[in-house]
Structure formats: structure tokens, C-alpha cells
């Protein structure tokens, strides 16, 4: 049995609350991985350059 199959099997036995907890954890893990991609860093650097040059306004929410 592969690791993925073991995880799927274990997930099928979780309560709804446990499943929610796993989902929240997994969402956070995926979000953390996406935050620091080279593309994301490049987009931030590009926006910072544009703001420094005055070609993009700073917006705060």
C-alpha cells in the first residue's frame, strides 16, 4: 500500500471534526508552499519597484 493510499484510508475513518482539522492543516501547508515561490517573490519585487517609481499607488486595506 502506498503512502497516499494509507492516508486516504486513515482519512476515511475520521470524524467530521477531525476531517475539518486535517483540511485546515493541509490548506495552511499548501498556502505556505505557494507563498514563497520564485514567481510570487518576483511579483512582489516588481510591485515594489513600481511603487517606488510612483507608477503604482500604495493601497492599504
Image (tube, helix red, strand yellow):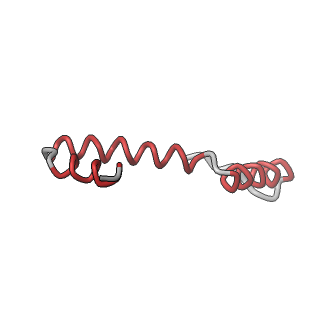
* Residue 24 sits above or below residue 5 on the image: above
Residue 6 position in % (x across, y down) = 27, 49
Residue 53 position in % (x across, y down) = 86, 52
Q: Is residue 33 left or right of residue 20?
A: right
Q: Is residue 57 left or right of residue 29?
A: right
Q: Nearer the viewer, residue 24 or 58?
A: 24
Residue 7 position in % (x across, y down) = 29, 48
Seen as rendered, the residue at the extreme front is: 1
Q: Residue at 66%, 53% (x, y): give it.
A: 40
Q: Nearer the viewer, residue 60 or 48?
A: 48
Total numbered labels: 0
Residue 30 position in % (x across, y down) = 47, 49
Seen as rendered, the residue at the extreme bottom is: 55
Q: Residue at 63%, 45% (x, y): give it.
A: 36
Seen as rendered, the residue at the extreme right is: 53
Displayed quadrant of residue 14? top left
Q: Nearer the viewer, residue 38 or 1?
A: 1
Amino acid at each position: 500500500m502506498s503512502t497516499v493510499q494509507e492516508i486516504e484510508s486513515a482519512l476515511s475513518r475520521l470524524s467530521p471534526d477531525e476531517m475539518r482539522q486535517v483540511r485546515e492543516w493541509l490548506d495552511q501547508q499548501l498556502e505556505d508552499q505557494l507563498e514563497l515561490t520564485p514567481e510570487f517573490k518576483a511579483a512582489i519585487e516588481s510591485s515594489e519597484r513600481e511603487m517606488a517609481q510612483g507608477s503604482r499607488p500604495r493601497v492599504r486595506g
